[in-house]
Image: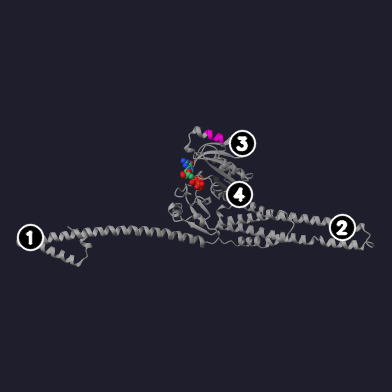
Amino acid sequence: MLNREDKYIMKNNNLKEIFFQLDEVRNLLRFKKKGLIEPIKTSLTNFENECTQFHQNFNTQKEEFNKIETQLTQEIDTLNVVKNKYDLVSSFLEANPPENQAMTNFKYLTTHDFIDFANSDASLKEEAKALSLLHDVEKRLQEIVTFPSIYNKNIVAVGGGFSAGKSAFINSFFIDKELKLPVGINLMEAIPTYITVAEESSIKGFSYKGGVVELSVKLYKELSHDAINSLGFKLKDIAPVMSIETAMDSCENICFIDTPSYNLKDNKERSKKYFKHANTLLWIIDIDVNGTVPASDLKFLKSLALDDKKLYIIANKTDLRTPEEIKNILDKYEETLTEHTIEYEGISAFSSLNKKEFEYRGSSLFEFLETVNIPINLQTNILDELKEVFNMYKMAIKEQILWVLKIHSHLKSLESDIDSKENQKTNEQIENMREMFNHNSLVEQLKKLETLEEVMLLLAKDIFTSLELKARI
Ligand SMILES: Nc1nc2c(ncn2[C@@H]2O[C@H](COP(=O)(O)OP(=O)(O)OP(=O)(O)O)[C@@H](O)[C@H]2O)c(=O)[nH]1
Ligand SMILES: [Mg+2]
């Protein structure tokens, strides 16, 4: 028999009619009109068979419909992923760098006025060095305009080999357990990320032209999933740098940088770049690999200019070793680092799984982090670098002026030694030389330089003021 739902689905008028007639027949049967019973029974059986057949057909069609529905849902999901990908890519392409007039003016001066000055000046021998320093200052200013959250933070770069646990180490400091830097092999592996403290978690991606795009924690999680990678999408292609703000204990003055593994292809120079302006380097070693400091790590560490930086070693994944093994490994690390004359503040046998320190040499990781959790005066730091660029030129020009003045004094004594009436010709030559070695143009050049310095320092200060104002809003 058909159930009520099936009856309802069969909107066929004929069938409705039949049901109506059947009900009539049932009524007739109640009065036991025997002559009618047999043919009616047969008709009923036939009808029931037809209904069963219909029911079966209906179920087969329903199954097919369900299959099509599932396929369509999958296709819609894929289309949604593509659409999200498209939306994300276009938002990155459309995003413009944060407006900062002082920064725009500073850039204009470095690429126009300063270059014009440098082209007109021949006194500085180490001009390439000065230009590279200026380029560096510009980049640092741009960096803080783009990432105002790193302003006055002590930069702590977290470096190490592939899969050593750099991201897991930083994650272990996150109080918001919903948020995680991607760990393991994934498409985000090579995106350097700045991490600073804030009450509310927020994630930003930075496009090649410095535009900023905010990502939700959900989207960030999805992007670290392989499904999107299989569509050929790599976040790092559109967002070469990211930043995360989130709650962390005792790190309010620190900006961690999750750096790209130095030993992955093309990453050596990229990761070095992030150590350059860091004051501190936390070097992560996978204690489980072979219990020694890898030779390539030693080579890389020695290639870094660590003189003005603090180095701290983390022997990570200690949960995978026995206490006995940990002791021996730390002894070996100490020995190797000393052998290679690499200075370090301490070694921590650490597990990023639960932020646990098992043992340490030198200072403990947490003690060490306390000593680096102090604000730095970025403004003085960068302004000093800018002044240094100008000083290099000033010194060179002043040296030239002194040299010219010396020539003048020689010419003067030469002149006084000569009998002016008899040596008219020599006198003329001396006069010519005086004009040749004219220091007025050098004095002019110096004035030009000092004016340019004044303007550029003011602009750099304006950049900092604008950031401070923004921070207060
Ligand atoms: N047992 C254990 N596993 C860890 C620990 N830290 C990290 N791992 C695992 O090691 C693997 C690599 O960790 P990541 O944090 O992605 O390492 P990474 O250095 O950031 O890797 P890349 O950025 O891809 O070079 C992951 O599978 C982690 O789960 C730890 O303390 N203990
Ligand atoms: Mg990582």
The magenta stretch is 327-332
Which is more foreground, mark 2 or mark 1? 1
- Picture residue at 29% right of the left edge, 60% below the top: 65
Q: Are marks 4 and 2 in contact (CB under 8 Å)?
A: no
Position of residue 349 measured from the top left corner of the image (x, y, whole percent): 52, 38
Kindly tell me whether mark 2's CB lies below 8 Å from ligand 1: no
The numbered mark, 3 or 2, whose residue comes first in the sequence reads: 3
Q: Are marks 3 and 4 in contact (CB under 8 Å)?
A: no
The residues tagged by marks 4 and 1 sit, at their Cα atoms, a distance apart of 100 Å
Q: Is residue 423 magenta?
A: no
Mark 4: give few (<14), some (14-19) or many (20+) Cα within 10 Å. Answer: some
| Most common secondary structure along the magenta stretch | helix
Using the image, tell me which numbered label, if any, was put on residue 411.
2
The numbered mark, 4 or 2, whose residue comes first in the sequence reads: 4
The numbered mark, 3 or 4, whose residue comes first in the sequence reads: 4
The numbered mark, 4 or 1, whose residue comes first in the sequence reads: 1
Relative to 131, does residue 307 appear above or below in the rendering?
A: above
Q: Camera-side residue: 316 or 266?
A: 266
Which residue matches tag 1?
38
Q: Amino acid at mark 3?
A: Glu
The residues tagged by marks 3 and 2 sit, at their Cα atoms, a distance apart of 61 Å
Q: Quadrant of residue 448?
A: bottom right
Which residue matches tag 3?
339
Q: Amino acid at mark 2?
A: Leu
